[in-house]
Amino acid sequence: MIDINLLRENSKAVAKLLKERGFDLDINKYESLEKDRKVIQVKTQELQGQRNQFSKNIGIAKGKGNDASDLMEQVNIIAETLKELENQLSIIQASLNQFLLNIPNIPHDSVPNGSSEKDNLIVKESGKPQNFTFEIKDHVDVGLNHGLDFELGSKLSGARFVSMKGGMAKLHRAIGQMMLDVQTQEHGYEECYTPYLVNEESLIGTGQLPKFSEDLFKTSKGDDDSLYLIPTGEVPLTNFVRDTIIEESDLPLKFTAHTPCFRSEAGSYGKDTRGMIRQHQFDKVEMVQISHADASYKVLDEMVVHAENILQKLELPYRVVSLCKGDMGFGAAKTFDIEVWLPSQNTYREISSISNCEDFQARRLKARYKNLDGKNAFVHTLNGSGLAVGRTLVAILENYQQENGDIIIPKALVSYMGGKKTLTSK
RNA sequence: GGAGAGUUGGCUGAGUGGUUGAAAGCGCCUCCCUGCUAAGGAGGUAUACGGGGUUAACCUGUAUCGAGGGUUCGAAUCCCUCACUCUCCGCCA
């Protein structure tokens, strides 16, 4: 949620910044809501004050044993108006709140201009795609003889699901384990375990709701209670600090967790339908940092390195791109994507996304720290994949495939594979 | 799933309709004292939002005692719904 004071002070400037990321702020709607709010709130509070004063006096009179019927009559005169005003006020505040919840974050100054993927800025390239001396296969065909089974996934659950057996399932597990170990042992994150079903408040806190409910899987329990499957570990990890006040000296908090992620992929029909690039269910090791407001951009750079380290250990070619204003997610003020080389597609594909949300989520979450003056200030929240496990598996299958169908295990994973150095084709 | 007990400020814990935003203690902050000395005294110490303001200090109003709703001139206190915690029983991994 953006700071409403920014809108009050300079709605035009805010609208201009939001326009750059492709969001049309309805200034007229805001101004009319805000104008009504102001008039009604002032009037309501004035009447509430009067009522409180009368009631206090009634109490005093009765305490002394005096007759208070005169005072009570006067209160009754304002009672009806007050009730009506209170109703109006709560309606208008709800609309205003809803309006604010649907506004995306304001991009940071350093974010490149642009409206789509094409305008993203490549800031780093690492490793060189290798020249294969044979005709390469994509991960689906490579995986076929190693236990990667899409038919089984679709039999059990439908399109965009996968099952794995044997060496493939173990490799998948090894990747997640390695990532979690690196983030905890080398980068100082605290290992966490979280619920995979979360309530509505949590999703409002991180910004998936109210605007993006169609992207989520919603469960039901009985008639009305419902929980949502997490679309990313960012949701539970960031919500750890919802409604809390953190000691400044405890910042930054660094959380990581290996969780499944569930996405309905509404609106991506026909996109990446083959293979496991875009699944309804995938695993991810997530990094979350709760940072001091002054430190968050330094933290963002660190987190990019934390994600890069995994790819370096796996010796996979990748590049880092700075997303342009039009391509960033709803809550992000600045985002770096890391893209890994996929030989079958002859291109780089996203394998990690690392964002600084500044105080956008913190304001929704009421996540604050007490500063040196004893005042509460909003923390900055950052999240990033470290990395997406499924897509890492894809990258390994494709980059480490051999002409005979074998898959070389990257050195960094050998110990996690019980010393095995190759997955041999069946 | 059944029965019962709870949920109050940073913490402990009073408070069953009226100057209660909330006693007392602890903690914390400021000042005083400095032979009751690992002590004593005085004062202060929630959050959010609104209005005013030299948009700073500050003044002022409203709301908040798990959440939401209701009764009432007035609710921490009475009623209803829900969530969570604890104990016992059942069931289960």
Image (cartoon, helix red, strand yellow):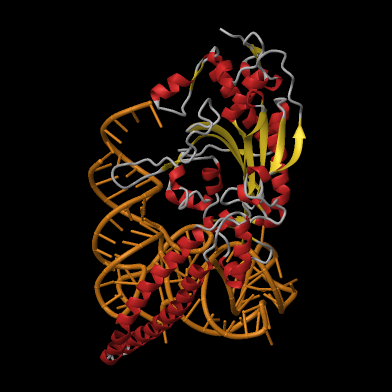
Residue A96, relative to residue A272: is it above or below? below
Residue A275 in sight from this viewpoint: yes
Quarter of the figure with the C terminus of chain A = top right
Image label count: 0
Q: In this image, A12 relative to A54: left or right?
A: right
Residue A7 vs A161, above or below: the answer is below
Left or right of residue B1, residue A19 in this image: right
Image quarter of residue A371:
bottom right
Q: Nearer the viewer, residue A20 or A85?
A: A20
Please, is residue B88 above or below residue B72 in the view? Answer: above
Q: Residue at x 74, y 19 (%)?
A: A131
- In the rendered view, would you say A294 is above or below A386? below
x%, y% of residue A32? 47, 73
A208, A340: nearer the viewer: A340
Q: Residue at x 46, y 40 (%)?
A: A266
Classify residue A51 by image quadrant: bottom left
- The answer to whether one can see residue A245 in this image is no
A89, A133: nearer the viewer: A133
A323 displayed left or right of A70: right
- Where residue B32 appears, as percent x and y from the top left, is 71, 79
> Where's residue A342, x and y in %?
65, 26
Please tell me which residue is depicted at 53% across the width and 48% down the height of the picture: A239
- Residue at 28 percent across and 85 percent down: it is A76
Q: Residue B89 in the image: x percent, y percent?
A: 27, 36
| Closer to the camera in the image, A76 or B93 | A76
Q: Quadrant of the N terminus of chain A?
A: bottom right
